[in-house]
Image (tube, rainbow, N blue to C red):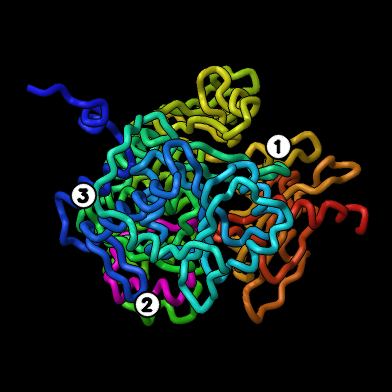
Amino acid sequence: MEELTPIQLNMLRRAAVGDILRRTARRHPDRVAVRFKNVTLTFKDLNEKANRFANAVSRLGVGKGDRVAIISHNCHQYTYCWFGLTKIGAIITPLNFMLRGSEIGYIINHSEPKMFFVEDSLIETVKNVPEKMESVQYFGCIKLGEGTKPEGWLDFDELVEEGSSVEPEVEIHENEPASLLYTSGTEAAPKGVLNTHLNYYSTILSSQTDCDFRPDDVFLLSIPLYHVAGLHILLAAVNVGAKTVIQYLPEVEEILQLIEKEKVTQLVYPATLFVKLIQHPDVEKYDLSSVKKCLTFGSLMPSAIYERYKKLMPQAVWRNYYGQTELSPLGTTLQPEDFERKPTSIGKPHLTVEIRIVDDEDKDVPPGQMGEIVARSPSVMLGYFKDEERTKKAFRGGWLHTGDYGYMDEEGYLYFVDRKKDIIKSGGENVSSQEVEEVIFKHPKVAEAAVVGVPHPYWMEAVTAVIVPKKDVQVTSEEIIQYCKEKLAGYKVPKYVVFVDELPKNPSGKILKRVLREKFKDLAEKT
């Protein structure tokens, strides 16, 4: 009997992201995998496209450990790129399509990709990057619209068609990186998070056991694929053999149309997008009866919004998950049976996750006491790319320090209080911005709200509410302050109230509080 080769031994038992698609394509070759506009692909189709892409870029010199950058809205080509690169041990580096100029230049020069694929509508943005992108050997164009491919650039679709559909045979190990995702933090320089093949395997297992992902589900992927949640949803859906309907952008009316047309069964959205969805004036005109499961994240679902959803979609069960890019991304989930019993909780740790609450000296705190949330799991990132110092700081004591403040109750349920950096220190007291936001959001004239701390000569930080009023209503700062006084301790009541037309957000719906802090940092001096 012949001895197995190293690659045969490796493929015999490995946990690699690209293998997930291959195995599902063997089990369900003719089942629909993804649909984007007028393009429908079975799992067999998708696997062949991923193989063609992988073999084509390999032929051009992309190999294990090489980064390949992509900046694009959601599309079917993105899925070839994600799965194809993982089949050859290369690392996908997705960029936020809202980035501009030097922001793109920083990430490209920090990640040093060999290839950079650009959606045609974003070509001018990339061409205007002031920095030289010296590591990029090939630029490629993803044609989705009427944009013109620059001379000398690769055509993504032609590249795929030229590649072989044969399954790549590359030795890949579970602790090697599969993605490099740049987080949008408050720091001047974004952090590059390296997530491994094992990280993603761990979280897709959690998504089945803790989030009820099933083969008969139909997912609507509206979250951008540059976001870890977008990559995870696609991967977890492929793992169970479910269909994924891809949306170019999370446009609310189109979401409603696609739910009705595609009979979507599961929605995974930040709470802010669920809020926008139910506030659409025509929401009740659409048939949403197919939706059986809603998974929210990013912030707590406002109770008033949840009550409206119970009437609109009484058949749907709700979960709330907590996580971050460094957790790939799942940490805890509040289950349907607890959603009303413990509405302010973010649930219990996932199957493969351990959670502790610690003080500033990394010692456990008792139930009910606030501290930093730390985690240990196979889903914890490999580290921050080219940043050993921040990696060591995040991993001190052998636990991932999330930078989030929270507490656990006597039953082991986790509660998120705030980002460590978003805790407002006012007059010697710690104020949770989220707690104040929850109160303000219940005001009948408020559409959206964000609470931040701004510098103050007496209070150190003044609690400041930035509010988007509902359309065609008049509301004053005095109304908001008086409303808060009736429901909050005095030190939590906003010192300032500012009204704006919209809150700054990233495409996944997260409010960018760092922008608000910067914009209103001189508020105390002006009043």
Q: Dot 1, how many residues are within 10 Å of its Cα: few (below 14), some (14-19), or many (20+)?
A: few
- Callouts 2 and 3 close, C-beta under 8 Å: no
Q: Which residues are magenta?
A: 250-274
Which amino acid is tagged 3? Thr
Residue at 37% from the left image edge and 43% from the top image edge: 86
Spatial CA span between label 2 and label 3: 29 Å
Give 492 or 449, whichever is nearer the viewer: 449
Q: Which residue is mark 1?
A: 430
**Residue 424 x, y percent position in the rendering:** 72, 42
- Residue contact at pointers 3 and 1, CB within 8 angstroms: no
Q: Main secondary structure of the magenta part?
A: helix
Label 1: state its secondary structure.
strand
Kindly identify the amino acid type of the residue bearing the numbered disc 2: Gln
Foreground: disc 3 or disc 1: 3
Choose the circle earlier in sequence order: 2 or 3. 3
Local SS, label 2: helix
At x 17% / y 25%, what residue is drawn? 4
The kind of residue on which mark 1 rests is: Asn
Q: How far apart in space, not on screen, are marks 1 and 2 (Cα)?
A: 44 Å
Residue 134 x/y as whole percent: 64, 47
| Residue picked out by circle 3 | 24
Mark 2 — residue?
257
Q: Is residue 377 above or below residue 511?
A: above
- Closer to the chain start, of discs 3 and 1, is 3
Q: Is residue 198 magenta?
A: no
Category of crowding for the residue at label 3, using alpha-carbon neighbours closer than 10 angstroms: few (below 14), some (14–19), many (at least 20): many
Label 2 Cα crowd, 10 Å radius (few <14 / some 14-19 / many 20+) = some
Name the quadrant of the N terminus.
Answer: top left
Front disc: 1 or 2 = 2
* Residue 316 seen anywhere in this rendered image of the structure: no
Residue at image coords 81%, 56%:
520
Distance between the Cα atoms at labels 3 and 1?
Answer: 49 Å
